[in-house]
Image (cartoon, rainbow, N blue to C red):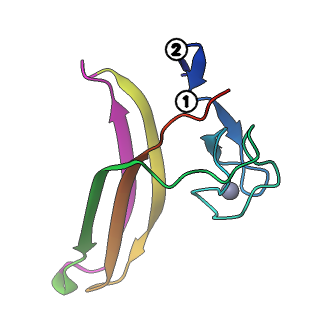
């Protein structure tokens, strides 16, 4: 879902050659697998650090020991300001033994677009 701003296209995507995650075309490090990518951005520069960490949420969940084993799925939904769903991803699924715990870290980083 690219958007044109001042003759530049922001939000263009490509596929990571290592893990196939959909990432920003401007990324020089894959945020999913953290591999350095062979193709740097158009200006041959390393991507600038995030100009804004827009959201950072950390939490944990656990299965009560008395409840027996359980199963979980972690779902992330992105919506626009009107509530329309733009993306929905199952990030991970798994099982929990009684009393077992998992931690979740969610972060949203916003970058300045690179000049074309
Ligand atoms: Zn990757």
Classed neighbour count for the residue bearing mark 1: other residues with Cα under 10 Å, few (<14), some (14–19), many (≥20)? some
Q: Which residue is mark 1?
A: 11
Instruction: Tell me if residue 109 can be seen.
Output: yes
The part of the chain drawn in magenta is 67-83
> Which quarter of the image is occupied by the C terminus?
top right
Q: Where on the picture, by quarter, is residue 60?
A: bottom left
Residue 77 position in % (x across, y down): 36, 39
Q: CA distance from mark 2 to mark 1?
A: 13 Å
The response on whether ligand 1 sits within 8 Å of label 2 is no
**Number of the front mark, 2 or 1:** 2
The residue lying at 76 percent from left, 46 percent from top is 44
Q: Which residue is mark 2?
A: 6
Residue 17 position in % (x across, y down): 79, 51
Instruction: Tell me if residue 70 can be seen.
Output: no
Residue 6 position in % (x across, y down): 52, 14
Q: Is residue 10 above or below residue 92?
A: above
The residue lying at 35 percent from left, 65 percent from top is 105
Q: Where on the picture, by quarter, is residue 71?
A: bottom left
Q: Which mark is residue 42?
A: none
The residue lying at 35 percent from left, 58 percent from top is 106
Precedes in sequence: disc 2 or disc 1: 2
The reply to whether the magenta stretch includes residue 69 is: yes
Residue 50 position in % (x across, y down): 45, 51
The residue lying at 70 percent from left, 64 percent from top is 35
Q: Nearer the viewer, residue 19 or 67?
A: 19
Q: Nearer the viewer, residue 19 or 14?
A: 14
- Element on which disc 2 rests: loop
């Amino acid at each position: 879902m690219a958007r044109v701003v001042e003759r530049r296209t922001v939000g263009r995507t490509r596929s990571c050659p290592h893990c196939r995650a959909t990432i920003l075309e401007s990324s020089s490090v894959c945020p999913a697998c953290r591999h350095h990518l062979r193709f740097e951005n158009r200006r041959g520069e390393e991507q600038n650090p995030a100009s804004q960490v827009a959201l950072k949420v950390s939490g944990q969940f656990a299965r009560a020991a008395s409840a027996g084993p359980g199963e979980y799925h972690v779902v992330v939904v992105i919506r626009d300001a009107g509530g329309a769903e733009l993306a929905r991803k199952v990030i991970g699924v798994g099982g929990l033994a009684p009393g077992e715990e998992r931690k979740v870290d969610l972060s949203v980083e916003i970058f300045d677009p690179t000049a074309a």
